[in-house]
Structures are given as structure tokens and as C-alpha cells.
Amino acid sequence: MKVKGFLKDVGGASRVTKARLAAFAGASSRPETVDPIADVARAWHPGRLELKVTQIRPASPTAKTVRFVRADGQELPYFYAGQYIALEFPMGSAVISRPYSLSSAPYQARGAEGFAEITVRRSRGDGFVADYVNDTLKEGDTVFGTMGCGQFYYEPLRDSKNIVALAGGTGITPFVSMAKEIAHGTLDLDMTILFGSVRSDDIILKEELEACAGEHVHIVHVLSGDEEGWTGERGFLTADLIKKYSRGDATYFICGPQAMYTFLRGELEKLDIPKRRIRFEVFGTPKDITAFDGFPAEEKDAVHQLTVVRGIHEDVIPARACESLVTALERAGIRIQTSCRSGECGLCRTKVLSGHVFVCPEGDGRRAADKDFGYVHACSAYPVSDVKIKIPIL
Ligand SMILES: Cc1cc2nc3c(=O)[nH]c(=O)nc-3n(C[C@H](O)[C@H](O)[C@H](O)COP(=O)(O)OP(=O)(O)OC[C@H]3O[C@@H](n4cnc5c(N)ncnc54)[C@H](O)[C@@H]3O)c2cc1C
């Protein structure tokens, strides 16, 4: 039986070959220019885009929302509510990248009038790009960006339709995108958002969020500041508070400042929530890498030599131990592709040819083989000796 089946297959294959040869013989010698599959792939993943800022408006006393469209007038690529955009900002001779969650909804990006938005909070004096966006970026400017990045979105095969969102400060932005999509009827979920802010007069995107509240979106504001007259919830997002507002078998989405991640891990543990039901957005660049276990204390203020190999080209630049390899490259005006700046996406995967780096334990998204063969994600690797690396030419 098997032999017969095999012979049938061979016979079939030879007939296909004859048919193909006939098709080749009758085909035009001019190259085929229409490729509908490639067109769809390009529309979904157009890569790095030039974007034009069309509107900047306040999102709170300390934050601004920036709206942009494609500079070439084409439609923006598709993204999932919850994903981020990696934006590049020209600063002097350098190009600095930062990830920002999209605070607009996917449906708002569709059509000729489509747009996307980010909401960025000013720093407390130690910032760089956040203050550039708030003080210098203006309508009409163009920036480059790659959008539809990250894994922080509802995935029906994995997540419950009942979402509890735990947000702190600007960590609300991905949930605003989700809430808008739910309120618009294009995302079929129930979402309860526990939103921690410090003061009631500085709640980011408050009006836009409230406009989405309804049957499927519930918002609970929680103030950590000691404010008179506030009748809502107070304090941090504790286990008791999370339990009070959780119903049934929920998936917990968490986005906020780094200190909140550490705190919430402990609180969620108290509630015995299975790990598969807990989704953290990526950690971001640590505020202070020297505070992590394993970072050599004597390296705190050290500056090393970083040799950067690109093809046959070699540069030697200074690199602070307390800053990532990506930051050292950006300071020196050397371009490297980055997206998450959290060690997750791997876009800045780099070969370490010699020397030692400390890899941030919160951002070690490397594959096992990469660890064995001396690769790091440059956004989460910190030089603790003179180091030589090899990066692609951009
Ligand atoms: C997935 C994700 C989503 C995010 N979404 C949002 C959001 O919706 N809204 C929001 O406000 N934030 C968001 N963030 C945080 C955002 O990416 C930035 O970290 C934040 O805006 C602060 O940026 P900053 O440059 O001002 O400060 P930092 O990121 O803290 O950068 C300061 C650092 O820049 C470096 N630096 C200083 N000078 C130079 C120089 N000359 N050249 C090169 N480097 C230099 C130094 O290392 C310094 O410590 C998100 C982060 C992640 C990971």
C-alpha cells in the first residue's frame, strides 16, 4: 500500500513539473511587479516610519499628549491596544530612542484621518527625552518611530476576558488605549482599572479615561497622597484593594513605575493568583542599576573604554558603568537599533568580543544560547571593565 502511495506521489509530482514547465514556457519575460502578500506584510510591518506631529495638548498639569500621523500621508500600521511605539529623537549629533505606550486606540489609527497618540510625563528634574517632548517638540516636527511593539496586549488564547488593570502614573497609557477600544465596541472585554495617582489634580488622561467608563470599563482612582476631602480609595494598590475590585477568574495586567512592580509582586502573591494570570509590562531602563544585587559596588562611578566594531570600522568611546551600552553608544552619536530598552525585544542584541558586562536581572531576556555564546542585549548590559563589542552597521 505504502509503495503504491509513494509511486502515486512521484507520478503526481512529475505531472506538476510538466504543468509548471508549460507555465514557464508561456510566461512573460518581464518581472512580476504585483505581490499582494508582500503588500499586506508591508502594511502590517512597514518598519521605521517618518511621523509628523499634528497636535500637542495637555494630559494633566505634568504631562502632554502628542498626536502624529505618517509623514508620507499613508495609513498607520495596525497595532494592538496596549502596545508601544519606539520613537527616535534627534538631540544634537545623537539620536536617542525611547519606548512610549500608545494612548490612542487602534480604531483611531484607521482611515485617511487616522492618527496615533502618546502621553508623556515631564521628569522630576532627572529626565532627558520626557522633558524634550514636553518643552521642545512642537506641532509640524517630524520624528522616526517603529510602532506595534511589545507583548502587553489582550491575547484571547492566553488571557481571561475579565481584565483587572493595575496602573500607576503614566502606566495608565496602555489601559487608556484598551479602554477606548472596548468603549468603541472593537475589543470585547470587561476591564476594571485600579489607577494609582499621587494627587487628584494631576491624574493623567482623567477625562479621556472617564469618557470610556460604562458597562464594560470600570475605573477606580486610588490616591497615595495625603489629600483632604478625597472620598475615594487611598494608599497603594494593596492585596486587599485588588481583592475588593476583582471578580471571577481575571487576568491581571500591570504597568507603572519600577517600585510598583516590586510592591505588586508581593501583593499578588498574597492573593495566590497563578503566574499565568499575571502580565507585567516590561521594566524599562532601571533608574539605578548600582542598586541591583550583583552589581560590583566599586564600579559605581567608573568610566571604561568601549571599543565598538562595525564592519572594518573601530571606535573607542567612554562608557559609564552605571549606564547601559546603548546609552554609551547614543552619547557618542553611534546608532544602534533599540525598541523596548528593557532587555526584552532583542533588537539591540550585541556580541561581546572581550571584557565584562553586568546584565540587569530585571531585563535579561536573552536566549540560553546567546548567554553561552557571549551575546547581550545592549540596552540591559552595563560595562564593568573595558569592553569590546561588535554591532551592525546602520
Ligand atoms: C514599554 C514602555 C512604555 C512606556 N510608556 C510611557 C508612557 O506612556 N509615558 C511616559 O511618560 N513614559 C513611558 N515610558 C517611559 C519612557 O520610555 C521614558 O523612560 C521616560 O519618558 C523618561 O525618559 P527620559 O529620557 O526623560 O529619562 P530616562 O529614561 O530616565 O533617561 C535619562 C537618562 O538618559 C541618559 N542620558 C542623559 N543625557 C544623555 C545624552 N546626552 N545622550 C544620551 N543619553 C543621555 C542618561 O543615562 C540618563 O540617566 C515607557 C517605558 C517603557 C519601557
Image (cartoon, rainbow, N blue to C red):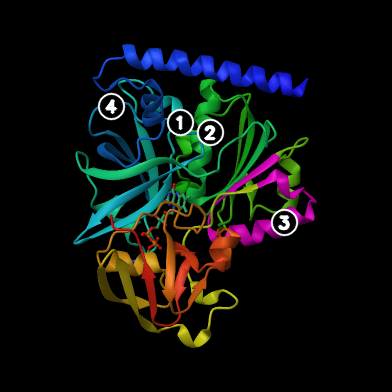
Where does label 4 land, which residue?
Answer: 74
Type of amino acid under label 3: Glu
Read off the magenta span: 251-278
Quarter occupied by residue 159: top right
Mark 1 C-beta to ligand 1 under 8 Å: no
Query: Around disc 1, counting alpha carbons within 10 Å, would you say few (fewer than 14), some (14 to 19), or many (20 or more)?
Result: many
Distance from disc 1 to disc 2, alpha carbons, whole Å, reads 7 Å
Which label's residue is closer to the chain start, 4 or 2? 4
Distance from disc 1 to disc 4, alpha carbons, whole Å, reads 18 Å
Residue 121: horizontal and vertical position, in percent?
A: 39, 52
Q: Nearer the viewer, residue 24 or 45?
A: 24
Type of amino acid under label 2: Met
Q: Is residue 268 magenta?
A: yes
Image quarter hosting the N terminus: top right
Query: In screen coordinates, is 131 left or right of 241?
Result: left
Type of amino acid under label 1: Ala
Mark 4 C-beta to ligand 1 under 8 Å: no
